[in-house]
Image (cartoon, rainbow, N blue to C red):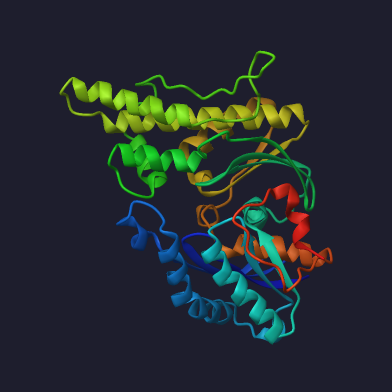
Amino acid sequence: MATVLAIETSCDETAVAIVKNREVSSNVVSSQIAVHQQYGGVVPEVASRSHLEVIDGAIAQALAEAQLNWSDIDGIAATCTPGLVGALLVGLTAGKTLAMLHQKPFLGIHHLEGHLYASYLTEPSLEPPFICLLVSGGHTSLIDVQAGGVYETLGQTRDDAAGEAFDKVARLLKLGYPGGPIIDRLAKSGNPKAFKLPEGKIGLPSGGYHPYDTSFSGLKTAVLRLVEKLKATGEELPVNDIAASFQDTVARALSKRAIACARDRSRDTIVIGGGVAANSALREHLLADAAPHNLRVLFPPLKYCTDNAAMIACAAADRLNRGDRSPLTLGAQSRMALTDAHQLYL
């Protein structure tokens, strides 16, 4: 039973957590949302500097909340890919330094593998195989999890990720940043059937459509055209109805593909991970659409949907138990496919 301290600094949250196998002992998250709101998005240089300012305190706080000493820690982990390189380097350097200082094994963790493991924190009995829908600001993927550390990507976005589309539509409607929570809140008092918007099907050269891939750039453009058309009438913009229609379209597209994927692969469980997993419409659509097919759908608690170190520690504990170790020469990478995560270990 491995106890791991993990650091997550891939974007705009400085997070440190301690997990014993799949039980969270502490989970510290310092968000930078307020810092980046004035820019309407994450500024990489600002993110890196903010991580540097708080990471030492976050590590100390995680140990204090868990009431543990370094002698109780079996391994140190840090997110090393994908993400903002400067931000990743802050956590990665801290993790490797702690591993050397306290003579602990070190593990570099793929950020998407962390999101995949978020549901393990509340469903400790969860085991592969299952389908995972990863939906965040930078990623939208359907993964067949065949075994621990064995992944096959079945579908992904061809352009904008789902979370990115939420941010862009929110900016278009002048709602602020981050867009996902704001649109979700406004959509609750809007009509999701007010406007018909395109789901973004991907055509195949042989005819028909790719069953698992998504595209949200066309949907974003359709919202832009709709807003321009409505503004031309001189009437007040029905923001809540637009938000509800847009959100419902995204949720339907993702739900339809995830369920098709699970049925085609004969999987009985769909696990959702990433920031968009917090979206209420996606949760409602998936749960309702999966029920007739006797599919189990697992959503992590809201606190584990956004970036956090508990999910990174959970993934690291599993890998440590399997004997994985990363070299201390491991560097940060802005991009890496989840299917290549095995390259991070000796």
The furthest residue to the left: 234
- Give percent across and percent down for residue 302: 50, 52
- Give percent across and percent down for residue 195: 36, 21
How many callouts does the rendering have?
A: 0
- From this view, report whether residue 62 is shown above or below residue 278: below
- Residue at image location 74% in from the left, 61% down from the top: 344
Q: Quadrant of residue 226?
A: top left
The furthest residue to the top: 207
Q: Is residue 13 visible?
A: yes
- Residue at image location 51% in from the left, 80% down from the top: 56
For the N terminus, give its image quadrant. bottom right
- Residue at image location 54% in from the left, 28% down from the top: 253
Q: Quadrant of residue 165?
A: top left
The answer to whether residue 59 is left or right of residue 312 is: left
Q: Is residue 126 visible?
A: no
- From this view, report whether residue 97 is shown above or below residue 213: below
- Give percent across and percent down for residue 228: 27, 25
- From this view, report whether residue 86 is shown above or below residue 102: above
- Residue at image location 41% in from the left, 63% down from the top: 32
- Give percent across and percent down for residue 279: 47, 42
- From this view, report whether residue 122 is shown above or below residue 25: above
For the C terminus, give its image quadrant. bottom right
Q: Quadrant of residue 82?
A: bottom right
